[in-house]
Image (cartoon, rainbow, N blue to C red):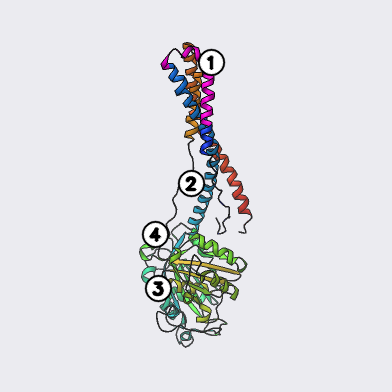
Amino acid sequence: MQWKFPNIPEKALPKNFSIFLYLLVFVVSIAIFAFAVVLINAENILPSLGLSCLYFVIAPLCFGLSITGIVYNIYHHKLLYVLFFNKKIESKHEQWQNWTRQSIWLVDSQYLTDIENLGLKIMGLEGSQPMNPEKQVPISTLHNLNSSAFFYVFEKILLPMKKKINQFSNIKVQLNTLNNSDLAMTNLINFCHSNNISIRDSNISASDQIPSPKMINEWVDEYDNQTTLIINLVFDVKNSLPFSEYCCALLFSNEYKASKLSKLRVFRPLTTKLTDLSDDIEYLIKAEQVDKKQVRQLWAAHLPSSALNILKGTFLDNDSEIIIEPNKLYHLDENLGVLDDSHAWLTLSLAAEAVNQGQKGQMVVAQCGDEIHIMQLYDKNMQPSNQKNELFILPVVYLISIISLLFTLIALIPANENILMTCFIIILMAAVALAFIIPVSQYGEIKTYEHEFQEIWSSELAKLDP
């Protein structure tokens, strides 16, 4: 499964035959059948009023209805193909939409920057909005510490999460720094031991590189009750970094117990590139991971001006399906200064804080390398579609018409008791056989339609870039 979805239009429903054509077929069929009965059996049935009524009234009416039903089946056959084709498109769309709506719980998140309560200030919920365009904002407190900077950071971002962390028995920890990851890991182990945080030493892995949020896709696809704690330490007390410093911790989980600790979900991220951003945003809108009317704020980080203009042109437009008010599009580069690829995680933490503050659905758009990641967060999950994908319409009209036609043919057989009885038995056996053959035949046609549709689908899917 992938984010790009083939744009195969639904087929228009075929037009049914005119009612006047059905009436013409009905009347002409009755006339022809009655004339044939007169030629074959007139001498034998005219003396009997009962036989005359059966042969000249009931039998021709049944024959006319049968022929009309067979003509209707021509339209029904075309209708069935179109309904099947459109149903398969609908089914594929539902499967794709359910895939895009898969999510992972963000049980808790904490961040540390030089600006206290950065998220609240950006949203205007506390104080004034900070403005630091094109500045490198260090965490000044860390540069003035005489003690371990690591312990100070862990106190700020891990201790508030201690209660929730201790609810899980086997947390995998990814500790990411810009350098000195081994030293950071040693300090983390010592901090957890001294503060009774239940993280196993063997479950901690350290890296000197901040990973891309693309890995969230992998976590969303995991169904083995994995819980992951991401810790990013983006600071350097010795050297001035060319971008603003921050630290954050985010606790993700697929375990069901996470639902009792947090309702916040991060939905499957969409990873795209600048050249495809405009088109791929349309896929995000169609996915409707979050109710379109509930997406209230957009957080942008480390984006080129062209990407930012695409976002503004899409979501600030009053005709857009998702409308963001201009003052709800937060450009983190203006608030915190110069950013780099790693700040996508900080932006995710800020958006999580916004949801927890009752600001409804949030969207995060951040660049990492040459990729742009779009993530949506909310504390409500869209219900997956559970519609049946199978389509099998029994050709009742056609079946009844054929069987009725067989029995009306008895009226065209010379009125001899022995011959009629033999013909009746043969026709009855044929009718029973047809009652089995016709549905099986239609089932075979549907399988053929399915094969044809799959070929069309595969062909269109191959035209899309992965």
228 relative to 425, above or below: below
The label number, if any, that marks residue 193 in the structure image: 3
Please state which amino acid type lies under the numbered disc 2. Answer: Asn
Q: Give the alpha-carbon distance from disc 4 to disc 2, as whole Å.
A: 28 Å
For marks 2 and 1, the one nearer the N-term is 1
User: Helix, strand or loop at disc 4?
Assistant: loop
Which residue does the numbered mark 1 point to in the structure image? Answer: 40
User: Helix, strand or loop at disc 1?
Assistant: helix
Task: Say whether residue 323 is visible.
Answer: yes
Which residue does the numbered mark 2 point to in the structure image? Answer: 389
The picture places residue 213, in percent across and down from the top left corner, at 52, 68
115 relative to 298, above or below: below
The picture places residue 295, in percent across and down from the top left corner, at 45, 68
Q: Give the alpha-carbon distance from disc 3 to disc 4, as whole Å.
A: 27 Å
Task: Say whether residue 206 is visible.
Answer: no
- Which of 294/338 is in front? 294
The picture places residue 405, in percent across and down from the top left corner, at 50, 25
147 relative to 422, above or below: below
| Magenta-highlighted residues | 25-50
Which residue does the numbered mark 4 point to in the structure image? Answer: 256
